[in-house]
Amino acid sequence: MRWLAKFIYFKVLGWKIVGNTNFSKDSLKKVVIIAIPHTSWHDFYIGLLLRKITGVKTNFIAKKELFKWPFGWYFRAVGGAALDRTSGQNKVQAIAKLFEDKEEFRLALAPEGTRKKVTEWKTGFYYIAKAANVPIIMFTLDFKNKQNKVSEPFYPTDDMEADFKYMKSFYKGVIGKVPEYS
């Protein structure tokens, strides 16, 4: 199926991968991947195609209720991890524990938290990476240039303002599927 994903991604859709194409190395078995801009449901299949092409297993988190019968097996099979979202839970620590408990865990998130236009990113991904002591890999969903740009691993420092400025600069000029939401 990898050849089919490559054919669709590269030939049919005309996309390309640029930047850090070695992000699947064994040394990066634990990482937070942030995908921006998240403006459309089309982002999902681009991500799935890229996942198949690169052979990089990625994970996501979802409310624990989704992991019950009849679909729970499917969500786990495609990299899902259940999260207890009841109030009073420290979700950052719970997600950081997933990194601790698993030999391989690459958590993909959209910091906007929605497909609509936002002025600020949610900060959970940053605190998760710090708590789990894992790097962040930045990943673009650039529909204007039909490319996924992948950053080198970035380890958050204790200067959140400077870190966000650096990360946001990686996405400068990137246009999502719905340009007005970028």
Image (cartoon, grey):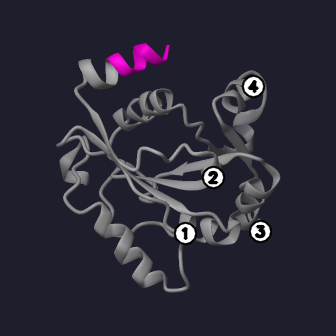
Q: Earlier in the sequence, mark 1 or mark 4?
A: 4
Estimate the x, y position of residue 55 in percent, counting from the top left: 54, 31
How far separated are the C-alphas under marks 3 and 2? Answer: 34 Å
Quickly name the residue at label 4. 73
Q: Nearer the viewer, mark 2 or mark 4?
A: 2
The residue closer to the viewer here, 96 or 153, is 153
Q: Which mark is residue 88?
A: 3
Q: Earlier in the sequence, mark 3 or mark 2?
A: 2
How far separated are the C-alphas under marks 2 and 4? Answer: 28 Å
Helix, strand, or loop for circle 4?
helix
- 3 falls in the magenta region: yes
Quadrant position of the C terminus in the picture = bottom left
Q: Earlier in the sequence, mark 2 or mark 4?
A: 2
Residue located at (40% from left, 83% from top): 162
How far separated are the C-alphas under marks 1 and 3? Answer: 20 Å
Estimate the x, y position of residue 140 in percent, counting from the top left: 34, 50
Q: Which mark is residue 126?
A: 1
Would residue 86 be visible to someone looking at this image?
no
How far separated are the C-alphas under marks 1 and 4? Answer: 29 Å
Start-end of magenta stretch: 1-7
Q: Is residue 1 left or right of residue 177?
A: right
Q: Earlier in the sequence, mark 2 or mark 1?
A: 2
Estimate the x, y position of residue 149 in percent, counting from the top left: 33, 48
In this rendering, is residue 7 above or below 169? Answer: above
Q: Is residue 78 left or right of residue 86?
A: left
